[in-house]
Amino acid sequence: MTYNTHAHITSWAVAIILFVVAATILNKAGKEKSQKIVKMILRLFYLFILATGLLLLFGGVEIDGEYIGKAILGVLTIGFMEMILARSSKQKSTGLFWGLFIVVLILTIGLGMKLPLGIWRF
Ligand code: HEM
């Protein structure tokens, strides 16, 4: 189990770094080609997040409301990352979505850490 949470944590940590690089530095610098490549790698990492998350979910825990909430929050986090990327490449405002992204990210990490598997337990 701990093995899987490590893979899960690595996946979303890398994804968040790639997302921030694509949405801020590369977007501001207008480096479209580099941004496209980073976005492609980022999407691969979404799959890793989903796969490791689903493995944790169906790995023998009793799936209750908190676990369902964790999965929904995780998917929402990915959704807001995609919204920000899509809107910033169309030069649309992203402020609201950055706010929503940060809120759901904090909730996802908080709930993940509260749930019993893995390396963090409070
Ligand atoms: C960017 C998105 C996500 C972030 C930031 C995130 C974050 C986390 C964190 C911090 C943990 C706790 C790890 C530990 O205690 O060692 C965790 C565990 C977990 N995550 Fe995610 N996650 C994301 C996406 C997902 C998705 C999409 C799913 C399901 C499809 C999912 C399902 C789970 C499950 C089942 C656990 C185990 C909870 C436990 O019992 O401790 N996560 N996640």
Image: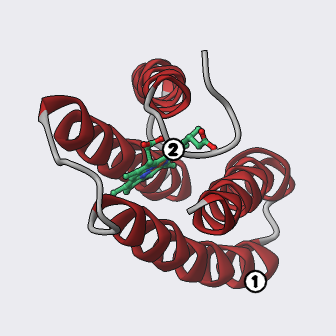
Q: Residue 1 falls in which quadrant of the image?
A: bottom right
Q: Secondary structure at mark 1?
A: helix
What residue type is disc 1 on? Lys
Spot occupied by residue 59 in the image (x, y as percentages of width and height): 35, 68
Foreground of the two, 21 or 50: 50
What residue sits 25% from the left and 40% below the top?
A: 67
- The structure residue drawn at horizontal position 59% and vertical position 74%, both measured from the top left corner, is 45
Q: Is residue 70 above or below residue 97?
A: below
Apparent side of residue 57 relative to residue 8 in the rendered image (left or right): left
Name the residue: 73% across, 72% down.
35
Q: Position of residue 42 (x, y in %)?
A: 62, 72
Which amino acid, mark 2? Leu
| Residue behind mark 1 | 33
Ligand 1 within 8 Å of the CB at mark 2: yes
Query: Residue 117 bears which disc, if any?
Result: 2
Residue closer to the observer: 1 or 85:
1
